[in-house]
Image (tube, grey):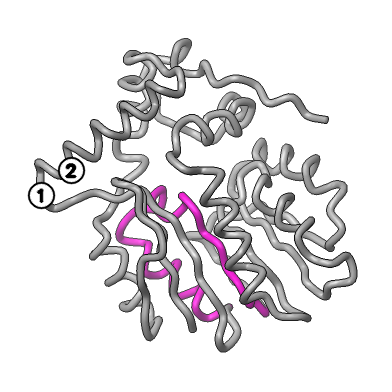
Amino acid sequence: MEIKEKDTLFTETPGTEKFEFNDSVARVFDDMLERSVPMYRECLESTVQWCLRFAKEGSHIYDLGCSTGTFLAGLSKQFPAHADIRLMGVDNSAPMLKKARLKLASSPLPWKLIEADLQDDFSLTNASVVVMNYTLQFIPPNRRVEVVRKILAGLNPGGLLLMIEKVSSDNPKIDQAYTDFHHKFKKTQGYSQLEIARKREALENVLTPWTVGQNINLLMEAGFPSAEIYFKWNNFSGFVALK
């Protein structure tokens, strides 16, 4: 059983270094997510429920930005072993996929991991569900609609796109409150003020959050007939859209 290593990355790394999903991040990523993302476990469980409801026999479930495979590994155990479902994980980080392969080794469902950048010539096929949690925010804003259009093209009729994003507000006072609440959450998880400040600096111009309205408009512009929020915690929102 793999031991989860505690995230002390930003006690060692100055925030002036650009954030990358490299070996150092992959090593502590599971702990980083749980201690940095409010209601992370609850969101995992909710995403599983959506997948169980909308997955169709003979189809694929994609996790775009699958990182270390935590979601897919957990999801695989929720289906009957005889289910005709294939799990597809996509990530552009080789160190993340290395850890994902270990987690999926005991999966009762067939699976495939693909090292690919969603901005490149990548396409989906036969998808009944596509999950993209905490992923689109790392794609340059001018490329996001193109990525979502590719997702829509690969979804089967009635297919589901589920995504969770860090969001911002057009109102500066509300946006500052979001930031303060998030930092307070991180402090309760044991991060120091220095670690929080360094990580925020490292993510500058790497993670670009949009407002709820911008995300909804993006999904509609890409061609989804409707889209709405299913989850909200201050500066984190979950979106759902059906083809």
Type of the residue with mark 1 = Asn
x and y percentages locating residue 93 in the rendered image: 60, 42
Q: Where is mark 1, residue-wise?
A: 171
Per the rendered image, the range of residues in magenta is 126-154
Q: Quadrant of the N terminus?
A: top right
- Horizontal relation, residue 150 to residue 88: left or right: left
- Horizontal relation, residue 28 to residue 209: left or right: right
Type of the residue with mark 2 = Asp
Q: Residue farthest to the top?
A: 12
Q: Secondary structure at mark 2?
A: helix
Does the magenta-highlighted stretch encompass residue 134? yes
Which residue corresponds to the image point at 30% horizontal and 21% vertical from the top-left? 197
Q: Nearer the viewer, residue 239 or 13?
A: 239
Q: Where is mark 2, residue-wise?
A: 175
The Cα atoms of the two marked residues, 1 and 2, are separated by 6 Å
Is 46 located above or below residue 158 in the figure? above
